Image (cartoon, rainbow, N blue to C red):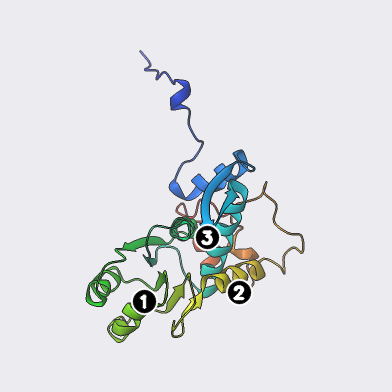
């Protein structure tokens, strides 16, 4: 006898096969619905699923432009905020692995997480978190990049997240001059990025990079 499984309305599938394609599909299905509501400069601001999908796409392409490869580790040293989720989805979308760090950790504790995971980049929340990584950077041989969400203050040579997003937008301009649309939120194949070498194009087509279109 062949087994069957009943599905109730509350158990309907999202259509996602991995966490990496979860947001891209949500951006397609719920494009104009509110995904995030956050207070900015004292006022509440809404972001739709389509907008969030585009932000994640730009961050992911920026990471690829920095040379982040599928399977590499990227740490997130940040408190609870929308950018934490954007970064997490973006890292996963590239085929890399997100490695969270408690924002209350000391520099030495951050060194232990980053060093033992072999993280090649760290996304920090602000100057205080950047300072922790800078303090131990000489003992982190695998670390290539520090990225900062809020670039105010002394952030050393950290790359602002907005700059990373701009690099992501620039990476797809040579292929098409049209702006990405809400109906096309997925991350394009690395072959469409400006600087992607052959090895990275192959990595983008691996099973882990499910949001890349190969």
Q: Residues within 10 Å of mark 3 (few under 14, many from 20)?
A: many
| Residue situated in front as seen by the camera: 17 or 78 | 78
Point out which mark residue 195 bears. Answer: 2
Q: Residue at x 44, y 85 (%)?
A: 156
Q: Residue at x 60, y 41 (%)?
A: 33
Q: Is residue 175 left or right of residue 21?
A: right
Q: Is residue 48 visible?
A: yes
179 up-or-down from 65: above or below: above
| Residue situated in front as seen by the camera: 171 or 166 | 166
Residue 144, position in %: x, y? 41, 79
Residue 186, position in %: x, y? 60, 52
Q: Residues within 10 Å of mark 2 (few under 14, many from 20)?
A: some
Q: Nearer the viewer, mark 1 or mark 3?
A: 1
Reading the chain from its start, which is encountered first: label 1 or label 2?
1
The alpha-carbon separation of the residues under discs 3 and 2 comes to: 13 Å
Q: Is residue 127 left or right of residue 63?
A: left
Q: Residue furthest front?
A: 42
Residue for badge 3 = 204
| Residue situated in front as seen by the camera: 64 or 164 | 164
């Amino acid at each position: 006898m062949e087994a069957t499984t009943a599905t109730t309305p509350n158990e309907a599938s999202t259509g996602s096969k991995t966490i990496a394609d979860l947001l891209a599909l949500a951006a397609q299905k719920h494009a104009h619905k509110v995904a995030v509501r956050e207070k900015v400069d004292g006022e509440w601001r809404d972001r739709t699923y389509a907008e969030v999908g585009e932000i994640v796409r730009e961050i992911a392409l920026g990471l690829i432009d920095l040379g982040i490869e599928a399977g590499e580790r990227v740490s997130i040293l940040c408190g609870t905020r929308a950018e934490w989720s954007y970064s997490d989805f973006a890292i996963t979308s590239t085929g890399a692995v997100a490695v969270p760090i408690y924002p209350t950790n000391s520099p030495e504790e951050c060194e232990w997480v980053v060093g033992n995971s072999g993280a090649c980049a760290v996304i920090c929340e602000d100057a205080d978190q950047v300072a922790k990584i800078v303090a131990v950077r000489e003992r982190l041989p695998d670390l290539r990049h520090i990225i900062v969400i809020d670039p105010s203050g002394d952030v050393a040579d950290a790359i602002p997240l907005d700059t990373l997003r701009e690099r992501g937008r620039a990476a797809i301009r040579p292929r098409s001059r049209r702006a990405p649309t809400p109906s096309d939120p997925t991350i394009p194949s690395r072959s469409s990025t400006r600087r992607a070498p052959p090895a990275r194009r192959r990595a983008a087509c691996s099973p882990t990079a499910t949001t890349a279109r190969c």
